[in-house]
Amino acid sequence: MSQKLVIVESPAKAKTIKKYLGAGYTVEASMGHIRDLPKSQLGVNVEDNFEPKYITIRGKGDLLAKLRKEAKKADKVYLATDPDREGEAISFHLAQILKLNPEENIRIEFNEITKDAVKKSIKNARPINQKVFDAQQARRVVDRLVGYEISPILWRNVKWGLSAGRVQSVALKLICDREKEIEKFVSKEYWSIEADLLKGKKTIRTKLAQYKNKKVEIETEKEAQKIEKDLKSGSFVVSSIKKSTKLKNPLAPFITSTLQQEASKRLNYQTRRTMSIAQKLYEGMEVKGHGSVGLITYMRTDSTRVSDEAQTAAKEFIETNFGKSYYPSTPRVYKGKKNAQDAHEAIRPSNVQLTPELVKDSLKSEEYKLYKLIWERFVASQMASCKLNTISLEVLNGDYKFRASGSSVAFDGFMKLYDYQSEEEEENTAIPELEENEVLDSREIKLNQHFTQPPARYTEASFVKTLEELGIGRPSTYAPTISTLLNRLYVERDKKSLLPTDLGKIVNDLMSSYFKDIVDVEFTADMESRLDLIEEGKETWKEVVGSFYAPLKKDIDHAESTVSKITIEDEISDELCDKCGKHFVIKNGRFGKFLACSGYPDCKNTKAIVEKLDVKCPTCHEGDVLQRKSRKGKKFFGCSRYPECNYVSWYEPVKESCPQCNGLLYKKYSKKDGTYLDCATEGCGYKKKVEKASEEE
């Protein structure tokens, strides 16, 4: 019996595919890349037209020996790595090592790991795409030249262990520039006026919009008070009532960036966590009654395209489970962005019949939540529009025009499954039946003071959106770019916000002064476009690298001769070292800030930075409760008398006691309730909302 070998990247993927192929096929995993540029040297021969020097990745020797052995036994070898540039590169290197002819039909790819997709891919096996590999190779070589040529300048002049990167450095500049905007921002006062009007016992909240048909801008309280005086002397008359029907359309199915953004907003997942979970869902999960199943399509994509088969399956599911009225008259097709890789599909469930509830018991909580988000977004994207009955109201008081708008759902459509709030949607107010020229009583006129706000710091969600809009990086780079900035301590998190550290600002200033092209948004976006042109066969990879490197080399030579040493002073703490008596200084480490003795290297004493709460330990009643951080950076609370007292909690205890049972109260947070106090006593059930809760605890 003939034997065929299929090579994929991961054991999970191998297990799922093996189930579909059955006897006659051996499925092995390469465990990711098997060859790369060496870590110990540049690995690119600049003098020989940028020829790369690839070596076997350390530790992969035994694995490659096994793959060679299996390849010799096989009558046919198929390379089934991921359907993108990195996957094509892994297949190219596997072909080189296993001495396979890259021009033969050895490369197979599939967007989803289902029986039909896998078997179809084998029938449609193709040669390795040299153009796609060249695009990846150009990206790898350019990134190596930037990293290995610039980073040593940072080591010598700023601090050992720093790095520069083609995408990383421009991303850091965006965060630093936003911080500069915030620091320079001058807040201005302005006022708004609302009028609560009465129709019988019903209140209608209206907002002042115009004066003499021009937009109202109120800068001072004095101006607001004058308008209030005018309004009180006049009367509110309904001048216009417009009723209409409005369609609200569903959002497109997820692409990588929108999945990362929505998972951040709705599930509070960081981009790296989202991609890690999505990878598992794609490669295969053990589902009761189904075995190992790839639950979603490939998760690195910038295309909103959906296959005809998936659309047909969605239609059948929607009409069966919701009714024919919930499916639009024609299938929905979403317009993709320019340069989207349309060979891929959007991120969607591989089998729409595997509903979140059906797989819930087989998945971990975080896996279930992300699958549910992907499943609901896809199904909703294929559903009928939501139909809204809208009403727009205009009320005149002399020359002052007030407005209000309201809406009610006439047909929920896709919103039965997946609701969202668009930026254009105005605040909704309940508007009773009114007639034009009707006079409304005034219940209250409210003068509201406001101050203009600086631009918001980036969250991971808004940062990914910005990177995508500016054309910086690709779906596969968003999460690693953010992780690198955090791991290098160039950027830190403040709740959900990303802000630059002092080190990040210093590195950015140096990069902005000496390597203007590397931190230029348009230059970086143009490089991404040129990589696409290589893939399309319109440019050669060595020409692209050469045109990139020539000006970079000049900048490197200039920086080497002119950059002067930058000293980063440690922040001195008030706390004294308990071993030598010298002041502690505040250092940044892998797991955040910590205290280190200023007497280093003579004294190597270190200490965690802890925050003391005004709460006594609920276990021993002697120690103070301290806020600490776990090795993964998660906040927790413990007793200052540890290890004598082993009290520990993920939730913050508060000073006040439960008014019902006198028990311990913890401060907790949920999206539904915000921040609230919760009694720890089992069966008590006391809960109290905390006003003015922060967005994220």
Image (cartoon, rainbow, N blue to C red):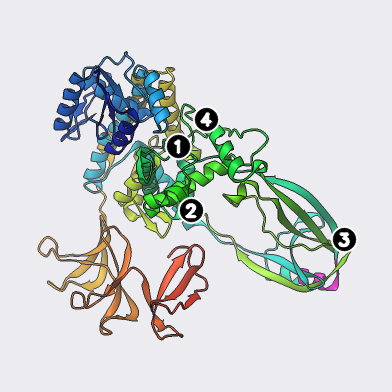
Q: Which amino acid is tagged 1?
A: Ser
User: Crowding at label 1, few (<14), some or many (≥20) Cα neighbours within 10 Å?
Assistant: many
The C terminus lies in quadrant: bottom left
Q: Earlier in the sequence, mark 4 or mark 3?
A: 4
Direction left: furthest residue: 602
Q: Position of residue 400 (x, y in %)?
A: 81, 62
Q: Nearer the viewer, mark 2 or mark 1?
A: 1
**Residue position marked by numbered label 4 in the rendering:** 309
Q: Position of residue 259 (x, y in %)?
A: 47, 44
User: Crowding at label 3, few (<14), some or many (≥20) Cα neighbours within 10 Å?
Assistant: few
Q: Which residues are magenta?
A: 227-236
- Distance (Cα) linking label 2 and label 4: 31 Å
Q: Nearer the viewer, mark 1 or mark 3?
A: 1
Q: Mark 3 falls on what kind of element? A: loop
Between residue 33 and residue 362, name the one nearer to us: 362
Between residue 517 and residue 271, name the one nearer to us: 271
- Distance (Cα) linking label 3 and label 2: 41 Å
Q: Residue 286, which numbered label?
A: none
**Residue position marked by numbered label 3 in the rendering:** 435
Q: Mark 4 falls on what kind of element? A: helix
Q: Answer above or below: position of 206 versus 552.
A: below
Q: Earlier in the sequence, mark 1 or mark 3?
A: 1
Q: Residue 509: tell me if it is visible.
A: no
User: Crowding at label 2, few (<14), some or many (≥20) Cα neighbours within 10 Å?
Assistant: some
Q: Position of residue 230 (x, y in %)?
A: 81, 70
Q: Earlier in the sequence, mark 2 or mark 1?
A: 2
Lateral position of residue 327 relative to residue 407, left or right? left
**In which quadrant of the rendered view does residue 323 lie?**
top right
Q: Residue 350, which numbered label?
A: 1
Q: Which amino acid is tagged 4?
A: Glu
Q: Mark 2 falls on what kind of element? A: helix
**Residue position marked by numbered label 2 in the rendering:** 265
